[in-house]
Amino acid sequence: MRFYTRPAWRTKGFTLIEVLVAIVLIHVGLLSLVAASAMLMRRTTETRIESAAIEAATNRLETLSAGPCTAGSGTAAGPFGIREAWSAQLVSPATLSLRDSVSYGLSSRTRVAVLQTGVAC
């Protein structure tokens, strides 16, 4: 009686090395996706804080330009650690110079946005 055995190159399935390499590649791919999503979340938060700071400065300048044509200055604090310092100076009897400096914190560093404009009285 003869037994037929298949040649080694014709066997079906994967070797242990092939399975381990596939697992390592999938693992690296998943880790890179997690890192990318963490970076995306951090950047989204930074953008939201920066947008709130610019909006606060814009609102302050609109409020100052709608008010009386007098010199003044002040400070204010807002959400997300936003701090602003504003000033209104009479450049001439018919022109008011408005300036708002907003500082806000982003991931261990502080950024400053300065908006400046002139308004006719």
Image (tube, rainbow, N blue to C red):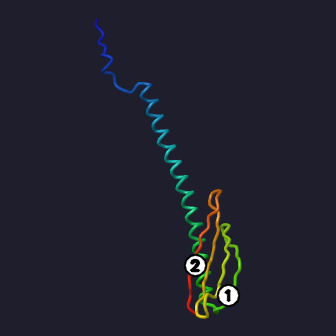
Residue designated by label 1: 71
Image coordinates of residue 70 in percent, x first then y, are 66, 91
* Up/down of 75 relative to 17, above or below: below
Where is the N terminus found, in terms of image quarters? top left
Q: State the residue at coordinates (52%, 56%).
A: 40
Looking at the rendered structure, which numbered label has been put on residue 116? 2
Please report whichever mark, 2 or 1, sits nearer to the chain's N-terminal start: 1
Three-letter amino acid code at disc 2?
Gln
Question: How many marks overall?
Answer: 2
* Up/down of 99 relative to 38, above or below: below
* Up/down of 3 relative to 49, above or below: above
Place residue 59 in its image quadrant.
bottom right
Question: Secondary structure beneath disc 1?
Answer: loop
Image coordinates of residue 22 in percent, x first then y, are 43, 33
Q: Give the camera-side residue of 70 and 31.
A: 70
Three-letter amino acid code at disc 1?
Ala
Binning the other alpha carbons within 10 Å of mark 2 as few (below 14), some (14 to 19) or many (20 upward) gives some
Q: Give the camera-side residue of 56 and 21.
A: 56
Place residue 8 in its image quadrant.
top left
Q: State the residue at coordinates (67%, 74%).
A: 84
Question: Secondary structure beneath disc 2?
Answer: strand
Q: Give the camera-side residue of 35 and 4.
A: 35
